[in-house]
Amino acid sequence: MSKIINKIVKKLKPSIRSVPKGMSFRSVPVLLATWFGAGLLRPAPGTMGSLAAIPFGYAIVMFLGQTALAIAAALLLIIGTFAAGRYGKKSGVVDDQSIVIDEVAGMWIAAIPAGKHLLLWLAAFLLFRLFDIWKPWPASFFDNRSKGGFDVMMDDVVAGIYALLGVSIAAVFSLR
C-alpha cells in the first residue's frame, strides 16, 4: 500500500517546468504567457494560472472598479493573443499547457459581476474552472481548432462568459 501512495505523491509532487529553448523567463512574452511563471507550475497549470489571476483582478476591482476589470480582460485578450502565439511557436505546441494568460483573461471575465464580494470570486473561480475543463460549444470549437494565439485565448474567453452568467445569477441572489 505504501508503494502506491508513494507513486501517487511522486506524481502529484509540485514541479516547475522550464521555458522553451530560445526563450528567457525574463522576456515579456514568456512572463505574460505563463502569467509570471504560474503556468510553469505542475500539476494543474491551468488551475495555477486561474488562481494567480485572482489577486491582480481583485486589486483592479478594489482600486478601479468592475468596468476597469472588463477593460483589463479585453486588453489581456489582445496582448495574450500575441504572447500565447509566440510562446506556442517556440514550444512547438500551439496550446502549450504553460500558457495561462488565457485562464487569466477568462477568470477576470468570470469575476466581473463579483465586484468586491469574495464568495462571488470563489464562485467565479469554480464556475470558470468547470467551464474551462468541460468546454461547451463554442469553447470546444476554438479548443479543437487551435491554430494560434487567438484560438488559445478564445476557448477560455468563452468559458469565462459562461461563468460570468453563473456569477451574475449568484450575485442577484446574494444581494437580496
Image (cartoon, rainbow, N blue to C red):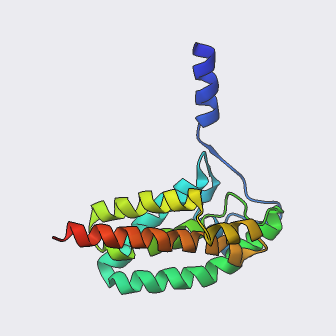
Residue 27 visible from this viewpoint: no
Q: Name the image quarter holding residue 32.
A: bottom right
Q: Position of residue 59 (x, y in %)?
A: 36, 73
Q: Name the image quarter holding residue 34.
A: bottom right
Depth check: give the residue in front, 138 or 132.
Answer: 138
**Point 42% across, 65% down: residue:** 54
Depth check: give the residue in front, 173 or 24.
Answer: 173
Q: Which residue is outermost to the left? A: 176
Left or right of 172? Residue 56 is right
Q: Position of residue 68 (x, y in %)?
A: 40, 85
Q: Which residue is outermost to the front? A: 137
Quadrant, the N terminus: top right
**Point 60% across, 62% down: residue:** 135
Left or right of 52? Residue 23 is right
**Point 49% across, 74% down: residue:** 161
Q: Name the image quarter holding residue 87.
A: bottom right
Quadrant, the C terminus: bottom left
**Point 46% across, 75% down: residue:** 109
Q: Position of residue 98 (x, y in %)?
A: 67, 58
Q: Position of residue 148 (x, y in %)?
A: 76, 75
Residue 57 visible from this viewpoint: yes
